[in-house]
Image (spheres, rainbow, N blue to C red):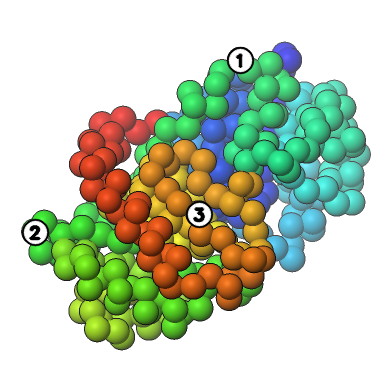
Amino acid sequence: MRANRPSLVFLNGIGDHFINLPAIRAVANLFPRQLSIICRAGAAELFCNLPTRSVHEINWGLDQRDQVLASDYVVDLLTSCDLLISLNPWHTDAVDRMLARVNPPMSVGFFAAFSEHVQLDFEKHSAELAYDIPRALGSLDLIAQHSGPPALPNWAESAANNLFRSLPSGSRVLAIHPETLAEKMWCLDKLGVLIDAFFDCHPNYYAFVIGVSNLSLDRGRHAARVIPCNGLPFYASAALVANADLFLGVDSCMLHVADIFRVPSVGLFGPTNPFEFGFRLTEVHCHVTGDGTMSSIEVPQVLMAMECVERRASQVSSSRRVLLQEAPY
C-alpha cells in the first residue's frame, strides 16, 4: 500500500505498547521517514530508533480515551495524512467521529469503519494480532525480525545499575511485579509465603519489588533480601526487570517488558488468558493459571514453576545479558 504521509494511532496501556512494538516497527519500516505515530504519554521512548517522521504523545486516562481520540488536537495531527492506520483492538463512537472528521483517502484497522478492514482474531497472541496490520499493509517481514529488545533511556539503565551494584558480588535478582487491577492481583500473603520458600533454597537471590505502591513484602524470614522499588519512574523499573535473572509477575505491563527482554519468567493468570496476553518471546517461561480467579492459585504451584524456570534460567542468564548489551533493536 502506497502513502506519502501515513499516520499510526495507538492509544492503549504502556504495556500494550511493548506487545505491539513488533507491529509498530514493521509499519515504520514500510514507510521510512514518512510515518507519524500518535501514542500514549511515555511511549515515545520506545520509538526513538525507528525511521519515523514524528511521534506525538497524548496524556490520557482510561476514562478520557474517547474524548481524546476525537479531540481537535488529534484530528489536527491527522488532517494531512493520506493513510490512517489504527492498531487499537477496540472501537467506539469516538473512532467513527475521528474518521469522519479526518476523512483520510485510505484507512486500515480492525473494524468495518476502516476502508481496509482487518479481522480481529482473539485466538492469537495479542502481538500476533497486532502484526496482522503490517501484513495487511504489505509487509513480508516475519514478526521475529522486529521483536528485539528496545533500547532503554541511558538514565534508566544507570539507575538500575546503581541498584544492582549495591548487591553483594555473585547475587542473582528476582524482579517481582505484583501490582495491577485488583482482579488480576495475587494474594499478597501467599506471595510473602512464596518469597520465603523460594529464598530458603536460594540464598544468593535478592528480590526487587516493582510497582507504584509499597506492598510491604519485606516482612518475612528473608526481609533483608527483599528490596521495595516502588515509586520509580517507569523506565527505571523496566530496566530493573530487563536485567533481572528471573521475573515473577501478574498480567501487567512489566510482564510484557520481561517478555521482550527475554527474561526467564513466571506469569500468574486468573481472569485473563495467557495465550492472548502471556509470554510470547522469552524462551524460558511458565504460565500458572487459576480457574478464572487469582484466588485459586496456590503457593506450591507457583513455587514449582519458579524452581523449574530458575534451573533453566541459570543456564542461559549470562548469555542473555550479553545479548542485551550488544544487540538492542
- Dot 2 falls on a residue whose secondary structure is loop
Compared to residue 125, the image places residue 103 above or below, namely above
Discs 1/3, front: 3
**Side of 237 relative to 168 (left or right):** right
Q: Which residue is mark 2?
A: 169
Residue drawn at the location 59% of the way across and 52% of the way down: 274
- Dot 1 falls on a residue whose secondary structure is loop
Q: In whole angstroms, how far apart are the C-alphas of marks 1 and 3?
A: 31 Å
Kind of residue sitting beneath label 3? His
Q: Which residue is mark 3?
A: 287
Q: Position of residue 318 (x, y in %)?
A: 20, 41
User: Mark 3: few, some, or many residues within 10 Å (few <14, many ≥20)?
Assistant: some
The circle drawn on residue 140 is 1
Residue drawn at the location 36% of the way across and 47% of the way down: 263
Q: Residue furthest left?
A: 169
- Dot 3 falls on a residue whose secondary structure is strand
Residue drawn at the location 51% of the way across and 41% of the way down: 280
Instruction: Determine which quarter of the picture holds residue 234.
Output: bottom left
Compared to residue 314, the image places residue 20 above or below, namely above
Kind of residue sitting beneath label 2? Ser
User: Mark 1: few, some, or many residues within 10 Å (few <14, many ≥20)?
Assistant: few
